[in-house]
């Protein structure tokens, strides 16, 4: 379709024709600036536009961080902003607790991380701290990290104890009657004990 006015020069018509044919070969459905769906080559440009750094982050971490960048900047200094920054690395497996939630010193916070698919190692923790340092208040500082290890396996242990006692009772024989009566009394006690071990957490 020719969109330029009829009185334009042939040069402009040629340029338009080239541009039209070029766009026809491009899948415009992939032309998106959404951090979660855009081409990986667009991520550095989005980081520049949002004025954030994605250096050292894996692709999915960078996408999640860029997706959260607007809200982090909007609510910077709040617990909400810190949680959004931390979630860029560990997702729903991390909880950021302010000092009044765990009895710590004022202006401190701590991480509680559930061991799941994301490895809880020095690299990922350092990346989380780096992003949180940008989102938190200047006076706030990290006081500790709790790693919760959940095990859904079933462990069974049992203990079996048995004891018995046998008694004999002989009544007094009646006169002129030859008799012998015998009573057997037995008692058996069965005890079953079940122990469930549920680790609550390991403090680093």
Image (cartoon, helix red, strand yellow):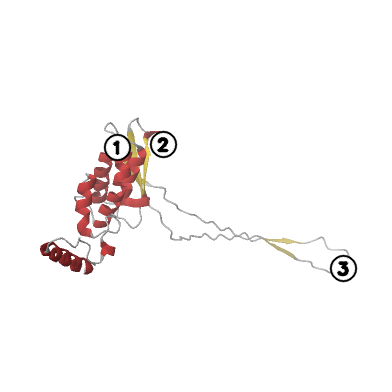
Task: Looking at the image, tell me whether mark 2 or mark 3 is earlier in sequence order.
Answer: 2
Q: Measure the C-alpha gap from mark 1 to mark 3.
A: 100 Å
Q: Would you identify the image quadrant in which residue 152 lies?
A: bottom left
Q: Quadrant of the N terminus?
A: bottom left
Give whichever of 193, 179 is nearer the camera. 193
Q: Measure the C-alpha gap from mark 2 to mark 1.
A: 17 Å
Can you give x and y, in whole percent of width and height, for residue 105 in the image?
35, 31
| Residue that mark 1 sits on | 136
| Residue that mark 2 sits on | 101
| Residue that mark 3 sits on | 177
Q: Quadrant of the C terminus?
A: top left
**What residue is rendered at 13% in x and 66% in y?**
14
Q: Would you identify the image quadrant in which residue 187 lies?
A: bottom right
Q: Measure the C-alpha gap from mark 2 to mark 3.
A: 86 Å
**What residue is rendered at 29% in x and 46% in y?**
69
Can you give x and y, in whole percent of width and height, for residue 40 in the image?
22, 59
Q: Is residue 204 visible?
A: no
Q: Would you identify the image quadrant in which residue 110 lies?
A: top left
**What secondary structure is found at the residue carrying circle 2?**
helix
């Amino acid at each position: 379709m020719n969109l330029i006015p009829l009185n334009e020069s042939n040069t402009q018509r040629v340029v338009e024709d080239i541009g039209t044919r070029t766009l026809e070969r491009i899948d415009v459905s992939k032309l998106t600036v959404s951090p979660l769906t855009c081409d990986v080559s667009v991520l550095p440009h989005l980081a520049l536009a949002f004025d954030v750094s994605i250096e050292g982050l894996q692709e999915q971490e960078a996408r999640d961080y860029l997706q959260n960048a607007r809200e982090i900047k909007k609510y910077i200094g709040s617990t909400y902003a810190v949680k959004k920054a931390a979630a860029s690395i560990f997702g729903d497996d991390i909880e950021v607790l302010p000092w009044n939630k765990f009895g710590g010193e004022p202006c401190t916070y701590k991480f509680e991380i559930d061991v799941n698919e994301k490895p809880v190692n020095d690299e990922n923790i350092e990346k989380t701290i780096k992003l949180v340092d940008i989102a938190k208040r200047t006076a706030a500082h990290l006081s500790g990290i709790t790693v919760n290890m959940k095990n859904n396996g079933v462990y069974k242990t049992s203990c079996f104890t048995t004891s018995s006692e046998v008694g004999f009772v002989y009544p007094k024989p009646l006169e002129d009657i030859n008799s012998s009566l015998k009573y057997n009394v037995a008692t058996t006690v069965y005890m079953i004990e079940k122990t469930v071990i549920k680790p609550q957490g390991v403090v680093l």
